[in-house]
Image (cartoon, rainbow, N blue to C red):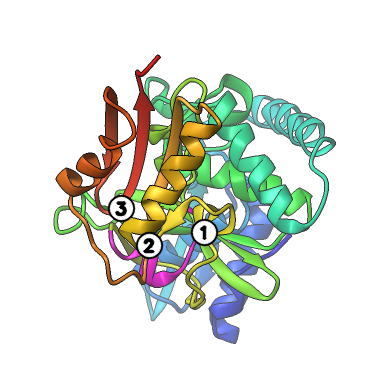
């Protein structure tokens, strides 16, 4: 279990963190007292949830009492003890079954989990009681960004790959509500990277899994994400994303034409190309389309403009 947020806390806050964690582990509503403010208590409860996605039941504070510089509160839950333990057993067994097939280096395990969630989970908020926790994605195949991110962390925890959940805003939310999105950070070969499975799920379609947000640096993710809450790790290495590593990225017209010639030779009907992050060549969609048209007379172009990733579906016989 990797507890990224706990490591950022002072000794006093760690004491409260551990008290909250102990109560959660027992599904207890016993009163907790602290000299810290209610705002800090709320923040620490969030950190416990982010570090420990297996404690998935709602953790609202039922009441605050203040007096003589002391704050007292109780944790409240949605599920009964019996139902909570039953769901926990089901989730644990599902995680074990999934992780049996995850092998190789950490990057390979992360990709396996990314692909598993893309293929087995649908973005769906219909069941609000489970969509925001690991229960929705693991047991029902449905969830939203925080539930999906918690599930990714729970899976990676079991496989001993260090990761954490990040809270912030996606492109459409920046400037509106800066805590409307969640994704992950993962540690690979002593470097930290961003990983947004939810966004990749939204871009993927039958027959093609997208990796637009797989292993990005701070610079790369900041194009359309804003971090609000994280453990503060620096993700400094660019050029390690999936498309760079698999040679699906380009930085010039000549490289695009070379890639297209290979796709024609291989008779590929559907593929993805990315403009390298540090490329001096920054073409627009029309310029990309004009070059593709040199090789394919009929095609459809699906752009992720912010990350400069283009999915190309050709219709030439």
Q: Which residue is mark 2?
A: 221
Secondary-structure class at tag 1:
helix
Mark nearer the N terminus (3 vs 1): 1
| Residue 51, image x, y percentages | 60, 59
Tell us which disc is closer to us: 2 or 1.
1
Foreground: 216 or 184? 216
* CB within 8 Å, label 3 to label 1: no
Does residue 228 appear in the picture of this structure? yes
Foreground: 253 or 11? 253
| Residue 20, image x, y percentages | 59, 60
- Badge 3, how many Cα within 10 Å: few under 14, some, many 20+? some
Q: Which numbered disc covers residue 244?
A: 1
- Specify the segment rendered in magenta: 214-223
Foreground: 57 or 295? 295
Q: CA distance from mark 3 to mark 1?
A: 13 Å
- Badge 1, how many Cα within 10 Å: few under 14, some, many 20+? some
Secondary-structure class at tag 2:
helix
Looking at the image, residue 188 lies above or below residue 177: below
Mark nearer the N terminus (3 vs 2): 2
| Residue 27, image x, y percentages | 65, 44
């Amino acid at each position: 279990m990797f507890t990224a947020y706990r490591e950022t806390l002072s000794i006093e806050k760690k004491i409260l963190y551990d008290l909250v964690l102990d109560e959660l582990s027992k599904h207890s509503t016993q009163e907790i007292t602290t000299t810290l403010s209610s705002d800090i208590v709320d923040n620490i409860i969030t950190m416990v949830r982010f570090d420990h996605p297996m404690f998935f039941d709602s953790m609202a504070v039922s009441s605050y009492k203040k007096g003589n510089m002391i704050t007292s509160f109780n944790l409240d839950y949605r599920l009964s003890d019996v139902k909570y333990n039953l769901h926990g057993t089901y989730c644990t067994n599902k995680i074990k079954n999934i992780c049996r097939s995850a092998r190789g280096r950490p990057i390979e395990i992360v990709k396996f989990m990314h692909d598993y969630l893309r293929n087995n989970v649908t973005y769906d908020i219909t069941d609000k009681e489970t969509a925001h926790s690991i229960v929705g994605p693991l047991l029902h195949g449905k969830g939203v960004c925080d539930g999906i991110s918690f599930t990714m962390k729970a899976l990676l925890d079991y496989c001993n790959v260090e990761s954490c959940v990040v809270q912030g805003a996606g492109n459409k939310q920046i400037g509106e509500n800066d805590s409307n999105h969640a994704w992950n950070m993962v540690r690979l070969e002593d470097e930290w990277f961003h990983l947004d499975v939810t966004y990749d799920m939204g871009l993927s379609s039958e027959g093609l899994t997208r990796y637009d947000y797989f292993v990005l640096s701070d610079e790369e993710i900041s194009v359309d994400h804003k971090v609000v809450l994280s453990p503060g790790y620096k993700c400094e290495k660019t050029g390690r994303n999936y498309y760079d590593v698999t040679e699906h990225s380009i930085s010039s017209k000549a490289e695009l034409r070379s890639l297209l010639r290979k796709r024609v030779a291989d008779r590929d009907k559907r593929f993805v190309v990315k403009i390298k992050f540090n490329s001096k060549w920054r073409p627009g969609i029309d310029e990309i389309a004009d070059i593709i048209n040199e090789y394919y007379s009929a095609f459809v172009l699906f752009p992720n403009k912010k990350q400069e990733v283009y999915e190309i579906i050709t219709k030439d016989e």
